[in-house]
Amino acid sequence: MPGVENRVALVTGASQGIGRACALVLSGGGARVALCARNQEKLQEAAAEIAAQGGCAAIFKMDVGREDEIQAGVKAILAHFGKIDILVNNAGVTRDQLVMRMKRRDWDEVLSTNLTAPFLLTQAVMGSMLKQRWGRIINVASIVGQTGQAGQANYASSKAGLIGLTMAVAREVASRNITVNAVAPGWIETAMTTALPEELKETMRKSVPMGRVGTDIDVAYAVKFLASEEAGYITGEVLKVNGGILMG
């Protein structure tokens, strides 16, 4: 099956966590990967890991909170690879606080990184996808964008907005053989959750019908599927990767 072989994938936030896992899984499927993030040292480590597995990756230092870096980065990727077939909008930040105490700068930073940046990146890669009449855009949302979460008004709003953006753009470009989908992870094991008290982790684990927390690879395989040729008739969808916490 074709999968993602010989495709070019741009992955933001590729230096760690879900973004890095997506880059590794897409590369493993035969895609060439443009690794984008702010931390060049971690990007180099990810690129080296991909190369060690026989894959092809190039690094592009990019702060998605800055429009000029998005434009310059996409231009450099197109010059290097000649096209962009797959965009994975993964980069994101949190600035948690109760809404009555939340600073405007914390609201603005989260919305800029988690929602405005995917919009700008989608605009930047669209020309390449329209020209070849093929494209896959996958936005990494969150279960919090579907359920809300106390202390995360900014983050939940950004992820809910990302789901709305996904469906709106999907309608605009569907006739050009470009699909736009989102994945909505639930509780995924990260460096942040590892540091939580064991009792809290156990309580959270029990809330998952599958009885375990998710991994970044669980999310990455969902992204790879939506990026593949086989998912060509799926668009405007939100694929839940949450072990059954939220159904329906």
Image (cartoon, grey):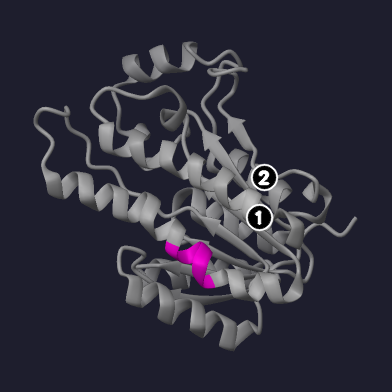
Residue 192 versus residue 56 in the image, above or below: above
Q: Name above or below for residue 76 compared with residue 146.
A: below
Count residues near mark 2 (Cα–Cα under 10 Å), then give few for <14, some for 14-19, many for 20+: some
Q: Name the residue under label 2.
A: 221
Task: Give the SS element for disc 2.
Answer: helix
Between discs 2 and 1, the one toward the N terminus: 1
Q: What residue type is labelled 1?
A: Val
Q: Which amino acid does label 2 sit on?
A: Tyr
* 101 is within the stretch colored magenta: no
Residue tagged 1: 25
Q: Which is the main secondary structure of the residues drawn in magenta?
A: helix
| Quarter containing the N terminus | bottom right
Residues shaded magenta: 120-124
Residue 217 at x, y = what percent?
A: 60, 43
Residue 15 in view of the camera: no
Q: Quadrant of residue 61?
A: bottom left
Label 2 with label 1: CB-CB less than 8 Å? yes
Residue at 33% over, 24% down: 149
Rendered position, 211 above or below 177: above
Name of the residue lying farthest toward the bottom: 79
Quadrant that contains the C terminus: top right
- Percent position of residue 214, x then y: 54, 31
Can you see residue 170? yes
| Residue 200, picture quadrant | top left
